[in-house]
Amino acid sequence: MNKLTRAGLGLLMTTAVATVQAEEVRIGMITTLSGGGSHLGVDVRDGFMLAIDQAARDDIEVLIQDDARRPDLAKTLSNEFMQRDEVDIMTGIIWSNLAMAVVPSVVRQGTFYLSPNAGPSALAGRLCHENYFNVAYQNDNLHGAMGAYMREQGFERPLLMAPNYPAGTDALAGFKHLYEGEVDGGEVVDELYTQLGQTDYAAEIAQIRASEADSLFFFLPGGMGISFMKQWQNSGVEMPVFGAAFSFDEIIIQAVGQAAIGAMNTSEWAYDLDNAANRAFVEAFRAAHERTPTLYAAQGYDTARLILSALDEAHPDDQDAFREALRAADFASVRGDFRFGPNQHPIQDIYVREVVEGTDGKPTNRLVGLAIEDIQDVYAEQCRM
Amino acid sequence: MSATLLIEQLINGLQLGTMLFLMASGLTLVFGVMGLINLAHGSFYMVGAYVTALTTASTGSFLLGLAAGSLAAAAAGAVVELLVIRRLYHRSHLDQVLATFALILIFSEGTRWLFGSSPLWLSPPEWLAGSVALPGGARYPVYRLMIIAVGVLIAAGLYLLISRTRLGMRIRAGESDREMIGALGIDIRRLYTLVFALGAALAGLAGSLVGALQSVQVGMGEPVLILAFVVIVIGGIGSIKGALLGAILVGVVDTLGRIFLPALFGLFMSPSEAAGVGTALAAMLIYILMAVILAFKPQGLFAAHD
Amino acid sequence: MTEHSTERPHDTAAAPMGAPRLGRQGLVHVALLTLTLLAPLVAHLLGEAYYVNLATRIVLVAMAGVGLNLALGHGGMISFGHAAYFGVGGYVAGISAYHAFDGSLLMGLPGSDDMLVIWAVALLACGLLALAIGAVSLRTSGVYFIMITLAFAQMVYYFANSWPSYGGQDGLPIYLRNGLPLIDSQDPLSFFLVCFALLLAAMAITARLMGSRFGAALTMARLNETRLATAGISPYPIRLTAFVISAMITGLAGALYADLNGFVSPAMLSWHFSGELMVIVILGGVGRLFGPLAGAIVYVLMETLLGGLTEYWLFFLGLVLLGVVLFARQGVIGWLAGGTPHG
């Protein structure tokens, strides 16, 4: 055998043997730390680790890996976590498509998964599982809440826009579900579907201009929303803009700048939401990271605090007891009230925020009021656990 | 479908087309003169955008940023030509593809290393913000009109450069007979470095201009690069005229397809289904266009030589 | 060109090779195969399923490379779009499993979670796709061929990306690995052995093909088209046949790869993957029977080891690749074993 192949085999062996013995509880986090939209993953991680650090327990080990927003990579990483590192709990995934690639097989192989962000409809309904908990929302929650809010505010001809992928079509369906129907005269004038990752919106803006719409509701997460808002500002189209918090988190509106002022958005959390847990969280996060947390940080924080509350009751090896402890959700959420529905997704209040000019002249979100109370996703009835 | 909307979309297509032309002209020049296929052309687009964003942020002047971006791209082009590309002229296309693929990896990951993965944000300057009225009542962003104007100026400039100057004469000589210019006593090495840097500068300019409209991030050059390849294949590799026509054709077809195909299918389908079928077809449209053109003209519309 | 008869590694047909350093080259081949087979066996005994799967990945990437090598190395057709076949093979596995899972029909046909059926369909689908793409692309040559194969692959990529029925950009999960008669495909080692056997078969087919008159004609079409024409043979059908077979091998690898990951997405169709596949073939040594295997071992191990050290490992891959292209044209096999490629 020649040198190179021998070296290769040797490396294979040493890495194989070097796998460490399990600590008491091992948590694997797969999240997006590089590429477009990495600030979501960074905030989930920072929020999560803030809670873990505050707990100061020495029996918890958190392993963190970057999925670069690639479903195939996320899948590989989850296999590594399960087969090589033998983690007890997995968490961290930001994007619904990555969650769909990873979660169904993870939970079916007996590992707990707690979602700090992605909440695709299939995992809330048809593919729900007793080992899967969503601590953030079902994806439709924020869109539906905005549908309800815009209808209540009397917008009669909204135009909807989203990327042409499952989360995008789900978003618009969720909006329409609570906007249309029953009484009222409102009607969606048009639905525009863009390419995922599209960077130029000139063609869509021309269509919006030519339409009869009185308002625009869009769902363009991450960098897409920033590009769109910048181009929208220079287009000269005057129309009130609405969206979910995904397009208006603190980091995105900083990048968009003045163009974001006046936009309304729905969120299950706001940094100026007044409760003790939230005040403490925002203060600690600002002290640790010198920036205002986004909703993703809040979700990461809540996820970790839920895990910690359940670990006080049982070890994940005792699956039934640990699952019961998670279901009880006995922790002080930064959102205020928090409870799980039968499909282990939250039933929660959704708020409306407005982007305003902050004291430093930069845009920031301000809590306006409640959009909808105790919203529960419509997929729960498809869930057979 | 109103006439103003159609006009606005045509202008959008034209704007995409001029931007593609900036990319494609460099690619096609480098191929025409040196016979080199350069996958790393998108990296110069990215270099231009990054340097523009950084310079604009530190000096506050967008024009200074634009100049710095183009110059940096040209410099990067010259260095790459001297170190790597120069060794590839006599190699097979396969080696050229692989070596320039390696350059993409080095540029992209190197940039990620230096500046991180988060996009940088660059905005058009105040004096180019906002929109103006078009004939017919619609409004159109000033900045996009400026991109078209720059594209037209560059096209005119390239035409003059190639038809009227000494350098242009040498480039034309190189395109028609690569051996001959050596015999004419022209310093080929310098000519090649110059042409390569010129192509890189144009790509850098395109990246800088578009960066202010969208975002500046690692990998931003790749989708544009592929489109630019389609452009030069349609136009005929090596032909500047072909690149111009191909760019406008691709820009307009892509823009109109994206809007009108979903609308067309929307006549007999629900919006989300129509969007699915329509956008799927629209995304493929320019490749279909290319296959059709090549089926009739295997050397593109204005073949220079293979 | 001589069929090499001694030191035949296992039961595969061995490489046709240049005579002088045949002993050393044969040894390298045996070593490569033994390594590929033994490493996962050891990992299995240690209970490390992860490393068994890593070896399976190497084998499948190598198989895709074997396919590309037939077109690129032996046939001189620089296809920059082989990801299309890899991805289509993957989607056949994904879509078939999807319909089998929820019992729905696709154009009147039921899905299947039997790998044998999936393989047959994947081979057929990739063969037909390559026939169409090859028929148009092979009318062109040189740079046009590179660009047009790239463009066709992009077409498939964008289609998969924006067609919503099978997940579009999100990709399509395979919840449970497709099955095989008599063999437990869920077991990592069994699945590895299946993939390994198929890799050997693909290499054997390539060797047989290149040893035949067809192979001689294909080599001649690459080296000297005019001479082939004077012999009264038209290069077009020869090239097209090789292109189609090449695509089918890559497609089969794609179908297996989707089952390995339990997931198929447009990423399998992206031009980056086409580039990576070319890199693997080049790293190993163009036109060498064992080149893709050597290239895949180097590439995947680099990705795993270097990727564990720095997240910017592609930067270093770029440097290595640049070095190989500029200074070490013969690839790993050439470096280890010497001898000339292209049988």
Image (cartoon, coloured by chain):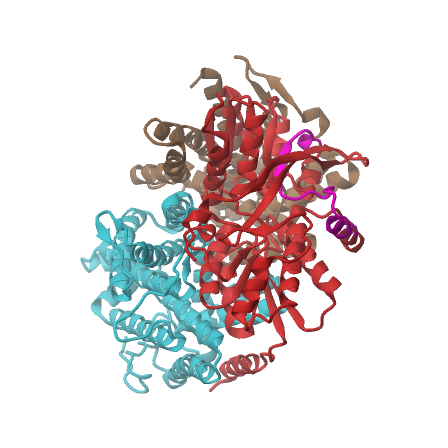
Chain colours: A red, B brown, C cyan
Q: Is residue B120 among the parts visible in the rendering? A: yes
**In the rendered view, does A282 fall on the left or right side of C119?**
right
**In the rendered view, does B245 fall on the left or right side of B215?**
left
Q: Residue furthest top?
A: B136
Q: Is residue B84 among the parts visible in the rendering? A: no
Query: Residue B69 placed where, x, y %?
Result: 68, 41
Residue appearing at x 67%, y 40% in the figure: B121
Q: Quadrant of residue A152?
A: top right
Query: Residue A245 placed where, x, y %?
Result: 62, 40
The magenta region covers: A258-283
Q: Residue furthest left?
A: C232
- Above or below, comparing residue C108 to residue C175 in the picture: above
Q: Is residue A275 magenta?
A: yes
Query: Residue A59 placed where, x, y %?
Result: 68, 73
Compare residues C152 and A27 and report the one nearer the observer: A27
Query: Residue A364 placed where, x, y %?
Result: 73, 37
Compare residues C244 and A33 and report the one nearer the observer: A33
Q: Quadrant of the C terminus of chain A?
A: bottom left
Residue appearing at x 60%, y 61% in the figure: C315
